[in-house]
Amino acid sequence: MSEPIRVFLVDDQQMVRAGFTMLVDSQPDLLVVGEAGDGAEALERLAVTRADVVLMDVRMPRMDGVEATRQLAARPDAPRVIVLTTFDLDEYAFAAIKAGAAAFLLKDAAPPDLLNAIRSVYAGDAVVAPSTTRRLLEHFAATLPDPTSAATEDQRLAGLTEREREVLVLIGRGLSNTELAAHLVVAEATVKTHVSRLLAKTGSRDRVQLVVLAYESGLVG
């Protein structure tokens, strides 16, 4: 059996951390390797603790999950971050996704959903359904920069082919790889190639970041 996925917990409520620990450690392929009560403590402990996935609360004292996510994402070989929030369409979750989080989940998500999210994020997927991310972005569309003045975003799109732009628009609209393949009438393997090239050309970390880019650049709105 391969090594378990190492999970680190960040939440200012000890009972919440205890509950997550019981859930995660009940799985043979998952292991809690540490915990912290705020973002600052998390950064300190993760500097000396090897973790694959971080469950990150967003509203915490001293340093919130948004800033902690931003600083973690800047580290080499950074763990993947799943942002946990109490409220759907939370502006903190929106900020955390822009800061580099790979997933956004509500704290009251069903246990199987949380466990599957950890596994999916570890595998390199963005577990937040693109439609959820799209809805989040639509809610906060007023905070996004005006695409006519976002020169840096235009530069990120400059090297894309017309087909890659089309794929980016469809990703921004929430289509899965299977749906993309059906829409474009191509094999799913071809879609995966397009997505990989989009990630490389735009410097995006994952699919969630591609959705954000589609909105920020004005391709989707």
Image (tube, rainbow, N blue to C red):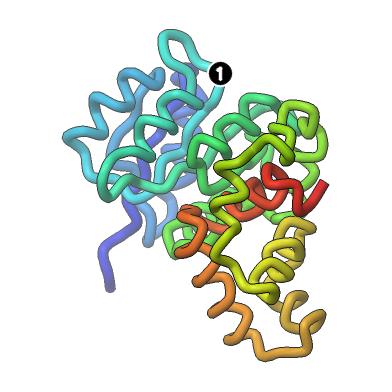
Residue at 62% x, 73% y is 161
Nearer the observer, 20 or 177: 177
| SS category of the residue bearing label 1 | loop
- Mark 1 burial class by Cα count in 10 Å: few <14, some 14-19, many 20+: some
Residue at 56% x, 56% y is 126
Residue 67, percent from left and from top: 45, 24
Residue at 35% x, 35% y is 72
Q: What residue type is labelled 1?
A: Arg
Q: Answer above or below: position of 96 versus 193.
A: above
* The furthest residue to the left: 48
Residue 166: quarter of image? bottom right
**Residue ID for mark 1:** 59
Nearer the observer, 113 or 199: 199
Q: Answer above or below: position of 110 versus 55.
A: below
Q: In this view, does 65 lie to the left or right of 113?
A: left
Q: Is residue 108 visible?
A: yes
| Image quarter (top left, top right, bottom left or bottom right) of the N terminus | bottom left
Q: Is residue 220 left or right of residue 12?
A: right
Q: Answer above or below: position of 134 versus 125.
A: above
Q: Can residue 112 be seen in this view?
A: no
Q: How many labels does the image show?
A: 1
Q: Is residue 204 left or right of residue 62?
A: right
Nearer the observer, 86 or 203: 203
* The furthest residue to the top: 62
Nearer the observer, 210 or 87: 210
Residue at 63% x, 41% y is 105
Residue 40, percent from left and from top: 34, 18
Q: Is residue 17 left or right of residue 116?
A: left
